[in-house]
Image (spheres, grey):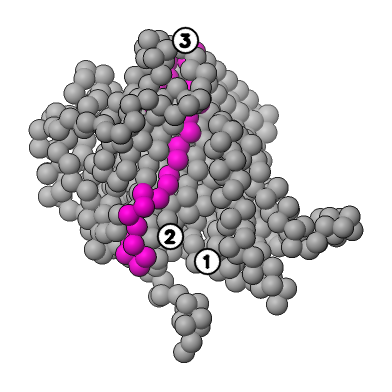
Amino acid sequence: MTDATASRIRPNRRSPSELTFEFESRRVDELTEGEPAWLSADRHAAYERFAALPIESNQLYTTYVDLRTAVLEDVVPWSRSRGEALVPHGASEPDPGTAGLAAFRDDQVETLALDPSAAAAGVTLETLGDFIGIEAAEALVARPASLPEDDRLAQLTRAGWNHGVVLRIPAGVHVRQPIVFRWAVGTPDRALITRTIVELGDGAEATILEELVPSGSEVEGRPGLFTGTLEVTLGKGAKLAVSSVQELPSSVVAFQHRDAVIGEGATLHWALAQLGSRLVRSRVDNRLEGDRSTVEQVEIVFGGADQVFDLTSFTHHLGRDTTGNLLSKGALMDRARSYMKGMIVIDRSAVGTDSFLGEFGMNLSKQTRSVAIPSLEIDQPDCRRAAHASSVGPIDESQLFYLESRGIPPDEARKFIVLGFLEPVVARVPLADAQDRLRELLEAKWDAGAGAGADAAA
């Protein structure tokens, strides 16, 4: 057997119930030492749910769970006593053009800094370890609805977090420049388990840029694990835009949960780009609890090699006259796979809902696989709109013909079409430098998989 043939053979598929990452109750006991009683109880309750739940609780999606590349038997979590003060080291100021920076490298805090004007306005940015010592912590950290209780991996993070950051913006404060959360991950055989909590008071406004990047400590063939949350609470009339760029090394498995509770008249924009990691399992939960609340979500995937992207989105309409607009797009090369699963739930109370879910995949070689499963669950007939759409296929030949007829070479034409397909997220990234960086990453990934065109034509 040649090396090339061997590289194309995948390991046996594991059942959805199998997760080789070992997380034991004694680790929860270690983490709770010196913590408040309410947090200890919250961790233990989450661990019990983690131990009892399957990886996928929705039978509609069970068929599409594939953990064969999540080989995590030797991975252990970073350990840190929550009673310790986490002292930042490195830069003491945020990046130019930003209002704040929380930068982490594996288990270390590199930077925790706010612009003086933001701090003077009452904005706070602190590690989760420090935050749990204040009176307001229990209401945010142990809030029952902050993470889905039917999701095993979300409960893993809730039980075992060993790092985290909290951003709070008071009512009426408008933070004009972005606040950056940067997680550098990659140490082999280690698990970084994080919670990021964001709270905006009534009428507050902010922009967040989340970056998931290599730490430089990764070793080929030795896996690492990143499991993280982004938990958002928006007060009445608040506005938040979140952009996330995930470019983790191919040795890392990533489990991500984003959960938002959106208050009356509040607006949330998600722009999520998934490029790296060997396997990504991501879930976004949007709860539109307030009347006239709005969520817009765009998520893109650009996969190559044997990458697997398992993306799920739940949008729950509870308030009156709420609006949801969700779009997922994936472009796949080589033998990459993506599963885009979405559910819109419209409660009886959600009169006047306007909600749309679109999932679209572009397969750039015959070996890729893209699955789109949009769904609706409607208990209120008085809706402005409740709709979904999906499609999966190769590049549109008419688009290729149009570009080639104007003198653009075939390979360049394919590149323009693919990068244009993914542009909706790029355009939403708040920093010009970060936009340029994302475009460079997309182009570099295209160049690395330049053989996909030959594969598709074979």
270 or 302: nearer the viewer: 302
Of the pair 284 and 419, the residue shown nearer to us: 419
Q: Is residue 289 positioned above or below 70 on the image?
A: above
Which residue is rendered at x = 21% and y = 39% of the image? 43
Q: Judging from the image, what secondary structure is the residue with disc 1 in? A: loop
Residue 364 locus on image (x, y percent): 66, 64
Q: Are marks 2 and 1 in contact (CB under 8 Å)?
A: yes
Going from the N terminus, do you reach mark 3 or mark 1 first?
A: 3
* Residue plotted at (41% across, 71% down): 13
Disc 3/disc 2 C-alpha distance (Å): 42 Å
Q: Give the range drawn in magenta.
A: 198-223
Residue 331 seen: yes
Count every numbered label the image shows and give the total. Answer: 3
Q: Mark 1 points at which residue?
A: 305
Q: What residue type is labelled 3?
A: Gly
Quarter of the picture containing the C terminus is bottom right
Mark closer to the observer (3, 1): 1
Question: What residue does disc 2 label?
Answer: 250
Q: Considering only vertical position in the picture, is 359 above or below 127?
A: below
- x, y (%) of residue 281? 43, 53
Residue pointed to by mark 3 = 172
**Residues at marks 2 and 1, CA–CA distance in whole angstroms:** 10 Å
The picture places residue 80, in percent across and down from the top left corner, at: 17, 41
